[in-house]
Amino acid sequence: MNGIINVIKPPNMTSQDVVSYLRGLLGERRIGHGGTLDPGAAGVLPVFLGRATRLCDYSIQGDKEYLGEISFGVSTDTQDSYGNPLEYGSKRVTHREVEDAFCRFRGEIFQRAPMYSAVKVGGQKLYRIAYSGKEVETPLRRAVVYETQVLRRMVENRFLFRVRCGKGTYIRTLCQDVGQAVGCPAHLSLLLRTRVGIFGLETGCTLDELRRWKEENRLSEAIRPADAAVSHLPRLVLPGTCWGQVKNGAGVPASRLCGGDAAEEGALVRIYLEEHFAGLGYLTQGQVKIHKLIWEESHGSIQ
């Protein structure tokens, strides 16, 4: 079983819980996910099956979009509604203040990783250090925020917002920073991820739907081809007769290309043998060379 399922993760379930559930449901050992969601968050979680797991790291390079709720009046040690209160404030903030504060964090920013996160310090994940009661200085990490929009006030000091950002952006840290910019402690109270690259809510499926489709022998309807996750990369096509060179990691002269897109020297590309997706590779020094092989000979002949 090879491919990708666009799963809609429910709240109160870790991303790894989703993977474990699907291992049991699908009977597939090789499963991974692209882009961790916090346990309390819900939304798009691309899940990779079989040899497609080799593409997990590449799939999360694209933009991500979120809908969230920021609550003013209290900050927490986890920066979301699941943590312990740290600081209180009574200021009633306005829509304009919140909008202006979010705008300050557009573009390239640096965030201090939350203590309750999977970022490693000294070989240990921060959340494990936090649970042990120890404190360490968390690292600064570069992030990019492309768009922010405050949609409306919900109740009292709660606002619904939308963010489009790059990989590695902590939305709960962004909410804490917005609170500091406004002058009132704040935390992330709700989070829904609406898009990861090409995967959106509109094409996702819930775990209940997957279970039902498994019972109805319709699971294939939910599995997308592996190359869907890297469709943003240039596509290079080689003749099927080049399979031997490709699978052995040998470079194939670019003069053998028989189709595809224009690609710059050194670019990461999708490599196809005729219509079959072979994997990812590079165009370098006039040669096409495989880097991550996806195709298996057991899939059938490509000559």
Image: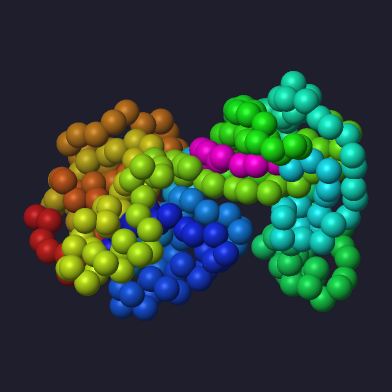
Q: Nearer the viewer, residue 270 or 95?
A: 95
Quick one: 93 or 291, which is closer to the camera? 93
Locate residue 97, reporting x and y percent: 78, 24
Determine if residue 293 is in view.
Answer: no
Question: Horizontal placement of 132 versus 155: left or right?
Answer: right
Question: Can residue 216 be seen in this snapshot?
Answer: yes
Instruction: Point out the stretch of residues depicted in magenta.
Output: 63-70
Name the residue rendered at 72%, 53% in the picture: 80
- The secondary structure that most of the magenta stretch takes on is strand
Instruction: Tell me: residue 85, above or below residue 179.
Output: below
> At 19% from the left edge and 63% from the top edge, which residue is drawn?
218
Whether residue 273 appears in magenta in the rendering, the answer is: no
Q: Nearer the viewer, residue 209 or 60?
A: 209
What residue is rendered at 75% in x and 37% in y?
156
Q: How many marks?
A: 0
Front-most of 5 and 123?
5
- 173 left or right of 202? right
* Residue 216 quadrant: bottom left
